[in-house]
Image: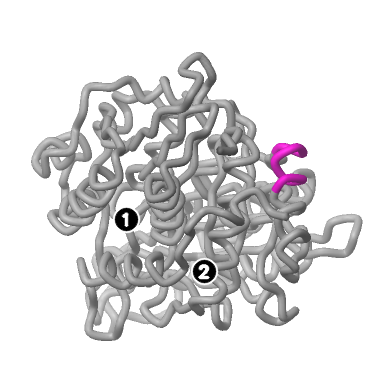
Amino acid sequence: MSIATNLPLSGERLWDSLMEMARIGGTPKGGCNRQTLTDLDAEGRALLQRWGEACGLTLTVDRLGNMILRREGRDPARKPVAFGSHLDTQPTGGKFDGVLGVLAGLEIMRALHEAGAETEAPLLLINWTNEEGARFSPPMMGSGAAMGLFTEDEVLAKRAQDGAVFGEELRRIGWQGKADPADLQDCAAYLELHIEQGKLLEDAGLDVGIVTHALAQHWFEVVVEGEDAHGGSPMAGRRDAMMAAAPLIAAVEEIALSTLAPSGEPGRGTVGVVEVHPSSRNVAPSRVFFSVDFRHSDPEALARMGEALAARAAEVSAARKVKAVVTPFWYSPMTPFDATLVARARDSAKARGLKWQEMPTAIGHDAVYMARKVPTVMVFTPCHGGLSHNEAESITPDWARAGLQVLADAVLATAGLVRP
């Protein structure tokens, strides 16, 4: 029998909450635009606060805006067991990315409250600030700073592309608290439910994925500088930054596919941002900026990908008489999750008769930063077609319920559900 079998966990209530939260920032195509530190983000936070306080939770907000909703345990000397995710979305995001993990955590709290049940350890439901990194980059700032990977000052000073400053926006929307983010390092465990953002589970006909580790990631910024030229000028002698950047951009995919791990698995490469100056129809550009996101299961292969990109940039610089510079921007190492927590999630899936598999995550999550300091595990649910960061992102109520059940069992096994 699973740990949470006798609790009134409600998949229907979870689904209704997901749909109600999705109305905040809802888009015409059925997605969500609730970017971090906007008025819509504040509205979503306020709704979570109301729901949490209605089931007896106490809210604390830290200096970076991370929301911590606490339920006391029978033994206040025990370290708390934390779980959650994020409410912020991409500009054209979906209803479930991040939100599923927060509201599934809320459903565990509601079920405990409804049953009048206790846990030995306190429980913390966390809504992390700026997981997406869509408005302020890099992503996962709230959890990263809490785990000591960024300083508070550098996070608060970050600027959006429109010039908005993180700290000023946090204060403007009224969600800067006084608690120390580093207090969250003192948790017994952290568990996070999330949609897969890939199609492995759906293609295999599985209910849940038990995530064992996170792939290594390395992000770069590339700047190519040449010389402005009139679109009607002769082609010979031009130092066109766009024509120099184009083969470098194409090389990202080539490098990813050709850089193999010992298992034969290739890497993953993405160019997500391109900026052109002066961006005029009849001017050959003098400057092109683009971002590169490399990921790999093998850290040594990931390092080779970065080296290959730098070598290509040097070749382009020499051949086209431009300056092409590749600068490291952000790095996340291969991160294992806690074996004991992985086993608890796996045991839950078995006990409930769910179809499951162990798998890595190639995508950064708050759980990946938490795992640097706190025992951590993730549980994945399938999502249709693997679509995410997309207004068409969708899951089924049954997938949400299965993820909720495994999360609840693992949380309560870790926190010590007190049997009446």
Image quarter of the C terminus: top right
Mark sitting earlier along the chain (1/2) = 1
Residue at 39%, 56% (x, y): give it: 103
Please identify the dominant SS of the magenta region: helix
Residue 83 in sight here: yes
Say what amino acid the circle numbered 2 marks. Answer: Ala
**Where is mark 1, residue-wise?**
88
Q: Residue 49, relative to residue 239: is it above or below?
A: above
Q: Quadrant of residue 173?
A: top left
Q: Please tell me which residue lies in front, 35 or 124.
A: 124
Image quarter of the N terminus: bottom right
Say what amino acid the circle numbered 1 marks. Answer: Asp
The boundaries of the magenta stretch are 338-344
Q: Please tell me which residue lies in front, 299 or 400.
A: 400
**Where is mark 2, residue-wise?**
400
Looking at the image, the residue that sits furthest to the front is: 420
Left or right, 58 with respect to 70, comes to left
Q: Position of residue 99 (x, y in %)?
A: 39, 59
User: CA–CA distance between discs 1 and 2?
Assistant: 19 Å
Q: Quadrant of residue 333?
A: top right
Give residue 250's mark: none
